[in-house]
Each structure stands twice: as structure tokens, then as C-alpha cells.
Image (cartoon, helix red, strand yellow):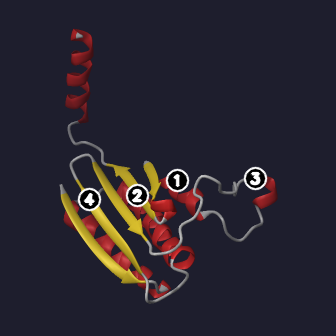
Amino acid sequence: MKQVKIQIPSLVENIRVVESFIDNSKDTFHIEDDIYGNIMVAVTEAVNNAIRHGNKFDRDKNVHLSLEVDANRVKFEVEDQGQGFDFNNLIDPTAPENLENPGGRGIFLIRHLADEVEFSKDGRNVQLTFFLTPENSGTETSSSDSDHTAA
């Protein structure tokens, strides 16, 4: 498993740093184009939320971003230094009464773009997992199928 971490002050202009981090990670770890777009949108949205809502634009507070890569997945972790929020009780941005609200779609979007989303530390930490397509998916599937047959 490979891991990379960065820390940025809570300034919106630092989203560019995050975009570069994701671009460099794509090249370094050979992340496929088909999930790259989902990663870019979901991770930058998570960092944006950490800057705006978590740290409330306080430049003295940082956002921590880490990346773990192994053969099967890419996992990003975003953590702010704010008060947290109730991630289990969010409005549904697709409900008719919320369609014209200017905000409230970030977490909805993140949950639809990432394969797994987990919140911890009262909502101050979010982990976004994106599954990689195994190069030998046919081999892995047939071996696990034969294990089930033998059992």
C-alpha cells in the first residue's frame, strides 16, 4: 500500500493545490481515466466543504488530505478542524421543496461518485473509496467461483 499526505490552509484558492495533488496521483499511481473524473469532483467537493463549512474559511485551520492506494482501491481521506456536523440528518436535495436551494448538493454528489463514503469524528473526517478495475478480473472471478463450488 502506498500513502501520500498533504495539509493546506483553509483558503478556497487552495482547491488548485488539491487538483494538482489528484493529477499527480493519477500519473504516479496509474489511476484510470474512467474513475479520475469521479475522484476529481468528489474529492475537491469534500475539501471545499471542509474549507467552507468545517473550518469556516479560517486560514489558521488546516484541511488534511491523504491518499492510500493498493491493487484494488484508491482511498482519499479529508479532515478539517471544525465542529463537525450531523451527517446522518441531511436534507434531500432531490426533494421538490429543495430543488431551487443553491446549496446542499455536495454530500449527495460525493455519495454518488465514490464507491464508498464513510464519515467519522462527528463529520470532521470523510473517507472516499474508489474501486480500481482489476487487470485480471476474469481470473479472480473464476478462482473465487471454483472456491464456492468446492465448498
Q: Is residue 49 visible?
A: yes
Q: Residue furthest bottom?
A: 59
- Mark 2 lies on residue: 127
Of marks 4 and 3, which one's residue comes earlier in the chain? 4
Residue 29 horizontal side relative to residue 12, left or right: left
- Contact between labelled residues 3 and 2, with CB atoms less than 8 Å apart: no
Of marks 2 and 1, which one's residue comes earlier in the chain? 1
Of marks 1 and 4, which one's residue comes earlier in the chain? 4
Residue at 22 percent across and 16 percent down: it is 146
Mark 2 and mark 3: Cα distance apart in space: 26 Å
Say which of 126 and 141 sits in front: 126
Residue kind at label 2, given as amino acid type: Gln
Mark 1 and mark 4: Cα distance apart in space: 19 Å
Point out the image quarter for the C terminus.
top left
Of marks 2 and 3, which one's residue comes earlier in the chain? 3
Mark whose residue sits in front, 2 or 1: 2
- Which disc is residue 111 wearing? 1
Say which of 23 and 49 sits in front: 49
Mark 4 and mark 3: Cα distance apart in space: 35 Å
- Which disc is residue 68 wearing? 4
Residue kind at label 1, given as amino acid type: Arg
Q: Residue furthest top?
A: 150
Say which of 111 and 113 sits in front: 111
Tell me the SS state at disc 2: strand
Of marks 1 and 3, which one's residue comes earlier in the chain? 3
Residue kind at label 3, given as amino acid type: Ala
Residue 135: where, in percent of width, then height?
22, 42
Dot 4 crowding, Cα within 10 Å, few <14, some 14–19, many 20+: some
Tell me the SS state at disc 1: helix
Q: Quadrant of residue 136?
A: top left
Dot 1 crowding, Cα within 10 Å, few <14, some 14–19, many 20+: some
- Contact between labelled residues 3 and 1, with CB atoms less than 8 Å apart: no
